């Protein structure tokens, strides 16, 4: 019989896993019963524990001493032997709660007297006010955090429910919980549990499917980061989470996924960050979760995204409800993956920092414009809102910049002759729809086209000073940045500058540029408008 338990070194916060296995008595160990990790080592007196460190750099070996392997480690130098008095095998949940919130018995102030008359006898109670106050505080607890408090077991049966009946949210991260059974023993006493954080507990999960029960019937948010859970184990446990909406599974060495059949159907958020998935095709296996609105794939090692069920210009049936996607810190190197994202019917927000494809364009503003033009329904890019004017500008520029490529690939102003090549459409799948939206680019727009760089996107605006000083500005410049430019030219603090502009479309009217945080495009400034500076 092998049992896993968790412990931590008394003088340190690092957790260790302790494996207990009964083995026969052996004279080589001085006639004592030898237990694999609670043992007597030859030539050393007393009892020793074999431990495997969370941080393998703290270990010395793989559980082997003098040619005999007493226990096994995942890392060849992740193990050590320590004395029992250096290990702490944890406390029950309620003890941790009382210690965490200063409600343990040691904190009770004795001395307040209460009396109770029973027949002819008067019974005196000492400290009842403090005890009642302590119990009242435990009754009122709704959010409980015992992070890093060495919780290892549930404690007495039903005691949690009697003492803390109103708990809804529990943070049990970085404790000594070693099995899912312990989690169930705690949760079964919390009738209205909605949020549970079990991150950084090295646990053993069920190897067979769990049946649906009332234990987690109201659980909406579950965090299992750094618990060594596999995706297979997630699916085995999932029948017990019928109302789950958010699931966090970061840093679990998950490499392959499986299709969730009849489980996780209520899931709205899934975080698989810091798991090195085998490839981008793994995403197809979770693509039919009907309510999934947010998918976080930060640092998952994916190099491409592809939805093979849909042609260019069409929408995929995969991820039907996905609104927010995070793919930061991956290996996506081709723009074709960004083109694929336009197939998602509900996508509104994208985070894609630190991918190789972004290195193909050195200017960040140009890069942003390209992404906006390629994904039609996007409203937020890298946490920055896309304003209608910004989208229009990005799409018009895209249509113009790749106009000559369109013509060379078979595009034509005559609809009957307009037959761009498959290669062009693969690289620019939105181009036909942009031509329908704004019209095909005119011949005059395409003459003398210059490369897509910030220098060639500068707006020709004039800064009206005593001597009509010209300076190039861009639509995305904030008023604060314009004032900074003026300070370098005039040495006048921005706080003393008052900006406004005049437009031929607004004859006789001067519009004040009064919000330093807004970009020029917010005020609909166009080429030929005159920016006025006063101080």
Image (cartoon, helix red, strand yellow):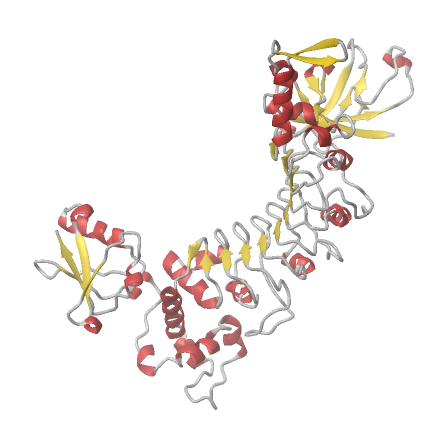
Nearer the observer, 523 or 64: 523
The reply, left or right, for residue 371 in relation to residue 326 is left
The reply, left or right, for residue 291 in relation to residue 353 is right
The quarter of the displayed image where residue 182 is located: top right
The quarter of the displayed image where residue 128 is located: top right
Residue 453 in the image: state x and y as whole percent: 34, 63
The reply, left or right, for residue 427 in relation to residue 196 is left
* Residue at the farthest bottom position: 416
Residue at position x 36%, y 66% in the image: 389
Residue 61 in the image: state x and y as whole percent: 71, 25
* Residue at the farthest left position: 466
Question: In the displayed structure, would residue 171 be above or below residue 415?
Answer: above
Residue 412 in the image: state x and y as whole percent: 43, 85
Asked if residue 352 shows in the view, the reply is yes
Residue 393 in the image: state x and y as whole percent: 36, 68
Residue at position x 19%, y 59% in the image: 500
Nearer the observer, 296 or 210: 210
Nearer the observer, 38 or 102: 102
Nearer the observer, 471 or 99: 99
The reply, left or right, for residue 167 in relation to residue 22 is left
Asked if residue 363 shows in the view, the reply is no
Q: How many marks?
A: 0
The quarter of the displayed image where residue 455 is located: bottom left
Question: In the displayed structure, would residue 243 be above or below residue 503?
Answer: above
> In what quadrant of the picture does the N terminus appear?
top right
């Amino acid at each position: 019989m092998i049992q896993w338990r968790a412990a931590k070194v008394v003088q340190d916060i690092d957790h260790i896993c302790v494996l207990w296995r009964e083995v026969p008595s052996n004279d080589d160990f001085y006639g004592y019963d030898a237990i694999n990790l609670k043992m007597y080592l030859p030539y050393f007196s007393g009892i020793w524990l074999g431990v495997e460190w969370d941080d393998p750099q703290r270990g010395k070996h793989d559980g082997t001493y003098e040619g005999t392997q007493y226990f096994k480690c995942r890392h060849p130098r992740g193990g050590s032997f320590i004395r029992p008095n250096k290990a702490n095998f944890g406390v029950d949940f309620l003890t941790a709660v009382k210690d965490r919130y200063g409600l343990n018995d040691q904190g009770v102030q004795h001395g307040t007297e209460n009396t109770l008359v029973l027949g002819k006898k008067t019974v005196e109670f000492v400290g009842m006010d403090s005890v009642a106050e302590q119990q009242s505080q435990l009754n009122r607890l709704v959010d409980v955090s015992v992070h890093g408090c060495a919780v290892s077991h549930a404690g007495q049966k039903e005691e949690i429910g009697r003492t803390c009946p109103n708990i809804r949210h529990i943070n049990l991260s970085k404790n000594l919980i070693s099995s899912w059974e312990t989690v169930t023993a705690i949760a079964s006493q919390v009738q209205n549990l909605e949020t549970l954080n079990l991150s950084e507990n090295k646990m053993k999960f069920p190897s067979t499917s769990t049946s649906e029960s009332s234990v987690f019937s109201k659980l909406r948010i579950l965090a299992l980061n750094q618990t060594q859970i596999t995706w297979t184990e997630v699916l085995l446990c999932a029948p017990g989470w019928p109302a789950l909406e958010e699931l966090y599974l970061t840093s679990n060495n998950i490499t392959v996924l499986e299709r969730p059949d009849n489980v996780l159907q209520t899931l709205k958020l899934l975080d698989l960050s810091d798991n090195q998935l085998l490839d981008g095709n793994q995403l197809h296996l979770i693509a039919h979760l009907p309510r999934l609105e947010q998918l976080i794939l930060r640092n998952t090692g994916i190099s491409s995204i592809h939805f093979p069920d849909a042609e260019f210009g069409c929408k995929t049936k995969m991820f039907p409800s996905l609104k927010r996607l995070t793919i930061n810190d991956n290996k996506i190197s081709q723009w074709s993956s960004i083109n694929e994202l336009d197939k998602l019917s509900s996508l509104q927000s994208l985070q894609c920092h630190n991918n190789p494809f972004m290195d193909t364009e050195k200017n960040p503003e140009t890069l942003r414009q390209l992404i906006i033009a390629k994904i039609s329904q996007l409203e937020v890019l890298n946490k920055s809102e896309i304003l209608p004017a910004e989208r229009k500008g990005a799409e018009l520029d895209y249509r113009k910049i790749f106009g000559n490529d369109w013509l060379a690939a078979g595009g034509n102003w005559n609809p009957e002759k307009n037959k761009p090549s498959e290669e062009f459409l693969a690289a620019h799948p939105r181009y036909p729809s942009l031509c329908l939206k704004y019209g095909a680019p005119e011949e005059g727009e395409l003459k003398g086209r210059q490369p897509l760089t910030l220098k060639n996107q500068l707006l020709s605006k004039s800064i009206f000073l005593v001597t009509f000083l010209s300076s190039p500005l861009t639509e995305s410049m904030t008023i604060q940045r314009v004032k900074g430019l003026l300070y370098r030219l005039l040495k006048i603090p921005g706080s003393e500058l008052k900006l406004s502009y005049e437009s031929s479309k607004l004859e006789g009217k001067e519009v004040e540029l009064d919000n330093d945080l807004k970009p020029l495009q917010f005020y609909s400034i166009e080429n030929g408008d005159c920016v006025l500076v006063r101080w």
